[in-house]
Image (spheres, grey):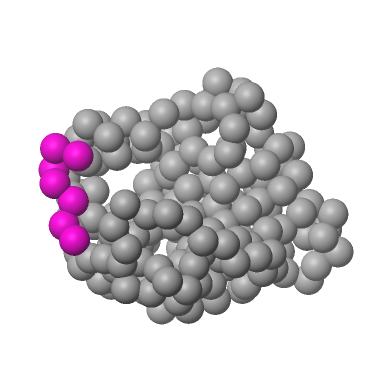
Amino acid sequence: MRTFLETARLRLRRFTEDDLELLVGLDNDPDVMRYLNGGRPVPRETLSTRSLPRLLHVHPRTGEPGFWAAEERSTGAWLGWFEFRPVDDRGGEVVELGYRLHKAAWGRGYATEGSRALIRKGFTELGVRRVTANTMAVNAGSRRVMEKAGLRYLRTYFQDWPEAIDGSEHGEVEYVLDRDDWLKSPVK
């Protein structure tokens, strides 16, 4: 299994078809899914036919997938995943950063560590010019990770969702980090 990136505590690797059961466990934790779908379980069929193919998709411009399975280096334990995906299949200069980790991994700095490492790789090796990230306005934990990774608040926006979830009335927030700002920043 090819490793995309390693940090002091994390290994990010490509997803495989064998990761389906790991996704089932992650996406059926109501706390993990609270700000994504209100905490409802995601059917295995949906994960198999929609989610896993999205995680496996290789972007034509970069030749890489945009989602990476995250493992703890010391134990090999599966922690969840990171997203570092071009927002457009035609180019890789603007990428979306995201993460979904098991509750047991929360509060341990993994999301910040992985995000910083992906940003560094993007700006120094992959030709990325801008990183963007989004979450619900009320998701204070995810917003704090974005800030610790060096992103800055850009805007609050509202979308029409098929089913409103608690907190959606406050909107979504977008954070960004441009390469030029990152180069000037002490957060790397």
Q: Does residue 168 show up magenta in the picture?
A: no
Total tally of numbered discs in the picture: 0
At horizontal 62% and vertical 53% (from top left) the residue drawn is 132
Residue 73 at x, y = what percent?
40, 57
Q: Is residue 44 above or below residue 116?
A: above
Q: Is residue 49 above or below residue 105?
A: above
Asked if residue 79 shows in the view, the reply is no
The location of residue 34, given as percent across then percent down, is 29, 68
Place of residue 70 in the rendered image (x, y in percent of width and height, measured from the top left): 39, 52
Answer yes or no: is residue 133 visible.
yes
Please tell me whether residue 148 is drawn above or below residue 120 in the rendered image.
below
Position of 123 with respect to 24 (left or right) is right
Residue 119 x/y as whole percent: 64, 53
Q: Nearer the viewer, residue 64 or 97?
A: 97
The quarter of the displayed image where residue 160 is located: bottom left
Indicate the quadrant where residue 76 lies: bottom left
Magenta stretch: includes residue 45: yes
Quarter of the image where the N terminus is located: top left
Question: Quick one: 7 or 142, which is closer to the camera?
Answer: 142
On screen, residue 171 above or below 92: below
The quadrant in which residue 57 appears is top left
- At 66% from the left edge and 29% from the top edge, which residue is drawn? 91
Residue at horizontal 65%, vertical 65%?
155
* Screen quadrant of the C terminus: bottom right
Q: Nearer the viewer, residue 108 or 51?
A: 51
Range of magenta residues: 40-46
Q: Would residue 17 appear left or right of 159 to someone viewing this image? A: left
Residue at the image position 65 percent from the left and 47 percent from the top: 121
